[in-house]
Image (cartoon, rainbow, N blue to C red):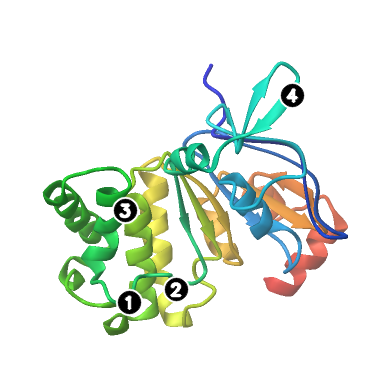
Amino acid sequence: MSAPMVHAEGVRKRFGRLEVLKGVDLTVERGQVCCLLGPSGSGKSTFLRCINHLEKVDGGRLSVDGQLVGYRQEGTRLHELREREVAERRRDIGMVFQRFNLFPHMTALENVVEAPVRVAGLSRATARAEGLALLDQVGLADRAAHYPAQLSGGQQQRVAIARALAMRPKLMLFDEPTSALDPELVGDVLEVMRRLADDGMTMVVVTHEIGFAREVADTAVFMDGGTVVEAGKPSTVLSDPEQERTRAFLSKVL
């Protein structure tokens, strides 16, 4: 049997005296969509950043596709990987942030093409052809020559998704991808994510979009205080939660 795409065992993370993650256990199988829900400060985004080693864990074990994140094991000891090795593994993990972080001096297509050419070594012609196909996939084929300032927030976020997909990732991480958008622009971004899920992309999504989690996720995870309070099928966690803390949270957001 193949390893889970994401497997966390007792993951801990602290910033100074503040322990943000207090022993997170979570498994995401390949092809699944996992939505992380919870109040601000619950550790959701920190955990997401640990998955691709943007944050280093302080305890526990975290692996992606059977490989430890940021470390290698020799006997019973863990050794931190060199930054180049971390970057090579990170290439397999696409990440979309709250803010779009596009290069303002590059067109939509140039933003998508840059990493495959500079990092993956694709020819510019190949990267351009794939970039145009990805922009078409996210509904922006007619915006390839536009600069970020000429695009709406929702369009910029869809370019950011295309840019992440351009590296042909095996796993996509989304950190509240619609939180910075005007309400009328949210639907277009969520629709792109729905199509990715339908195509079998493994996704871990930090979101406050309860409807999206209910419709698309295979697993809904409610976090609070740096721990997983409850996890399971969205139909159960969102409609008939076992934990009082989950019920209290949902009563305020539904």
Neighbor class of circle 3 (other Cα within 10 Å; few <14, some 14-19, many 20+) is some
Q: Secondary structure at mark 1?
A: loop
Q: Amino acid at mark 3?
A: Ala
Q: Which residue in the structure is indicated by mark 2?
A: 186
Q: Which residue in the structure is indicated by mark 1?
A: 104
Do the numbered discs 2 and 3 sit on residues whose CB atoms are within 8 Å? no
Q: Amino acid at mark 2?
A: Val
Q: Amino acid at mark 4?
A: Arg
* In this picture, residue 238 sits left or right of residue 59: left
Q: Which residue in the structure is indicated by mark 3?
A: 115
Sequence-wise first label, 1 or 4:
4
Sequence-wise first label, 1 or 3:
1
17 and 93: which one is in front? 17
What's the residue at 88%, 60% (across, down)?
17
Residue 139 rendering spot, x and y as whole percentages: 25, 65
Question: In this rendering, is residue 149 above or below 103?
Answer: below
Q: Residues under labels 1 and 2: Cα distance?
A: 22 Å
Q: Which residue in the structure is indicated by mark 4?
A: 77
Question: In this rendering, is residue 191 above or below 90?
Answer: below
In this rendering, the label closer to the viewer, 3 or 4: 4
Residue 6 rendering spot, x and y as whole percentages: 59, 37
Neighbor class of circle 1 (other Cα within 10 Å; few <14, some 14-19, many 20+) is few
What's the residue at 59%, 35% (across, down)?
81
Mark seen at residue 177:
none
Sequence-wise first label, 4 or 2:
4
